[in-house]
Amino acid sequence: MLSAADREIRLGIWKLHILHHAAAREVWGTWLLEELAEHGHTLSPGTLYPALARMERNGWLRRTGSAPHARARQTFRITPAGKRLLEELRREVTELYEEVVLERVSRKGGR
């Protein structure tokens, strides 16, 4: 079980991962749970589905198709706003990776 602080940080990583896949194809809950688990991220539907709903409310994802009932598969694709956010995040994650993992000196003078 993750601590609240650990989960809070990982939630951002999971959302970035979701945006990445939603840019390439339609995604849905069970597929995302399996995909994230392949990368060592075990989360429950009770964590994933509210995150998808928030991402939709924020305008980063949109539902595709219409589900015949509430428990039917809900599919999502990235929106133009989500694509812009993903492009920004890719640049920031690259910079963060270089600084934190590769321990390169920041362009801004710090470490």
Image (cartoon, helix red, strand yellow):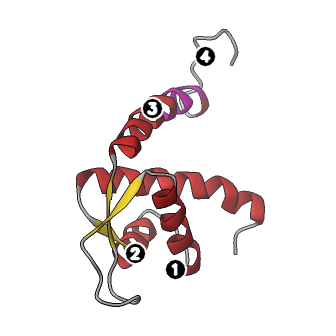
Say if 5 sits above or below 74 in the image.
above
Query: Residue under circle 4?
Result: 106
**Which of the image's four quarters has the N terminus?**
bottom right
Residue 96 colored in magenta in the image: yes
The earlier-in-sequence mark between 4 and 2 is 2
Marks 4 and 1 close (CB-CB < 8 Å) = no
SS for dot 3: helix
Foreground tag (4 vs 1):
1
Q: What's drawn in magenta, residue-wise?
A: 93-99
Whole-number angstrom distance, CA of label 4 to CA of label 2 = 37 Å
Whole-number angstrom distance, CA of label 4 to CA of label 3 = 18 Å
SS for dot 4: loop
Query: Which amino acid, mark 2?
Result: Gly
Query: Residue under circle 1?
Result: 45
SS for dot 2: helix
The earlier-in-sequence mark between 4 and 1 is 1
Query: Which amino acid, mark 3?
Result: Glu
Q: Residues within 10 Å of mark 4 (few under 14, many from 20)?
A: few
Query: Residue under circle 2?
Result: 29
Query: Which amino acid, mark 4?
Result: Ser
Residue 66 colored in magenta in the image: no
The earlier-in-sequence mark between 2 and 1 is 2
Residue 87: which quarter of the image? Answer: top left
